[in-house]
Amino acid sequence: MANETPETNGPQEQGKTPEETASEAKAAPAGGGGNAPADPSRRAFFKRVAIGGGAALAGGGLTYAGTQAAIRGRAIDNMDAAIQTDETFKPMDQRDLIFTQALSPVISKKHPERDAQYSKLNNKKFNFHEGAKTFEHAVPFDNSKTGFTQLDKAIHHAAWYPLDLSESHSMAFAQPNTRMFPWDQSDVEKEQYEFPSKEAAAHAIKSAARVWGASRCGITRRDKRWDYDPLYDVLKGRTLSWEKDFPFEPKTVIVIAIAMDYDALATAPAWTAESTIGHGYVVMAQIASQMAKFIRGLGYHAVGAGNDLGNSVAYAVAAGLGEGGRHAQLIVPGIGPRVRLCKVYTDLEFVEYDQPHDWGIAKFCLSCGECAKACPSKALPFVEEKDSGFGFQPTYEFSDEPGYTWNNHTGVLKFHTDAKRCFNFWIENDSACGNCAAACTFNEPDYWHHWFTMGMSTVAPGFLHSLMSKMHPLFGYGETGDPHKVDKFWKTGKGMRVNPKMLNNVSTAGYT
């Protein structure tokens, strides 16, 4: 699956409209204000800016506050304001996810009108369930077509193989209670470990996440708004209740982000991109299952989750990891949308919770639209649409047709996408896509000018956002469907015997 997994449909998380947050950021720099940064991660950021962007900062006056915001973001105190809903909102029924319609023969048979309406409006015969049956195994490799050769097919399937071995591949399609994410709580220690403080508990959890390979980790309160309700067991065709079937009442959700490989994702929509997408899911399963076991070893109940149980983007926003973008994915400052998300639900509540933050990303997305241009299925809202596609209800093509938005989480202020078209392209491509994440202006390597752009985002006016997004492809970033990027990927292993560039060695990042 690519990072734009159709079921995600994450909320657009500002506490206020994007226009309001920009003016507030000028008046109230995030991160507590102050002088030069004292901690190493902030020093590293300023080193990047100073080397290449000092003159631009001085000449353009695009503010110290902007660079502060790039690192910390502006904290949002009111959780309800961080993710706005209207009177039409209700929790997402898992039976209405695009993945459930595609994988469940029961739901597919119950709702044939969904296939019929989609086929009629899009002038093609398409059945979500029938397409899913052969997904990733329908199209033979072609050694004359770069990105779709035997080499690319082999790394695609190999990336997912650990989940196949553990019979947990279905967790990518929101299947709950898999072998990697069991609901069984029989191994919970009888004695509960007592942390000296809530801060110590949070530090312990995040330290464990770091050593296991997390790129980011945040902790938030369980919010029933973002839980799928009811839950649905796709494999057994059974509706599940939080009250009757889930093994305990969660109080806290730990959210973990795992960065994917830049060069691999840049090959999208080639099969080569699945090398990092599939591996991202494997690491999701690894870290979330380890974290759940860790929490149970401390005497508390815990269940790991991938795309199941709840909306990962919403919970990541609440945990302060990033913001939702036009492509309905989480955009993490410094990484972009190139992340996979996993969660751990637990009844441990003696812990310091993180706050949602605003980096001006949603405001930037209003003027950008590079992801929508790159989408081969035209599943994303365009800048030219009403309110730039940002609202409580979908604005994409056919969204005004009765019943067509059955898979959308309406009533949430965000950019709504047509996951039906997205999934349709996956079936045709015999692989996930990834174009929108690869094309995103925030998906860039760790160079000074990209951090400078991030720093400018909070305080720059809309016309500069538009200019910045146009400069992105001019410098060679974000172009999708480029066979040269596939060739480049297959050479990225050069020198790995001694690894002089310290590729993948990220544990000390920010401390140089």
Image (cartoon, grey):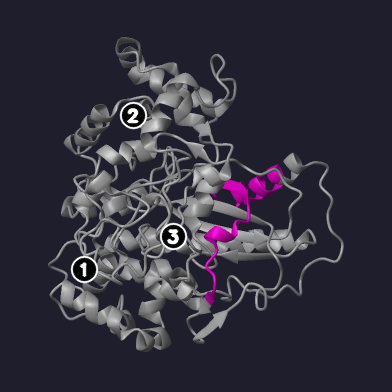
x and y, in percent, of residue 503 in the image: 42, 43
Residue 107 circle label = none
- Front-most of 165 and 358? 358
- Per the model, the C-alpha gap separating discs 2 and 1 is 37 Å
According to the picture, the residue beneath numbered tag 3 turns out to be: 88
According to the picture, the residue beneath numbered tag 1 turns out to be: 149
- N-term mark: 3 or 2: 3
- Residue drawn at the location 44% of the way across and 30% of the way down: 70
- Per the model, the C-alpha gap separating discs 1 and 3 is 47 Å
x and y, in percent, of residue 481 in the image: 18, 55
The range drawn in magenta is 202-231
Q: Which residue is at the far right?
A: 191
Say which quarter of the image contains residue 56.
top left
- Quadrant the N terminus occupies: bottom left
Find numbered disc 3 in the image and state the secondary structure of the residue it sits on: loop
Residue type (three-letter) at the residue carrying disc 1: Thr
According to the picture, the residue beneath numbered tag 2 turns out to be: 453
Q: Which label sits in the foreground, 1 or 3?
A: 3
Residue 2 in the figure: left or right of residue 72: left
Dot 3: few (<14), some (14–19), or many (≥20) neighbours within 10 Å? few
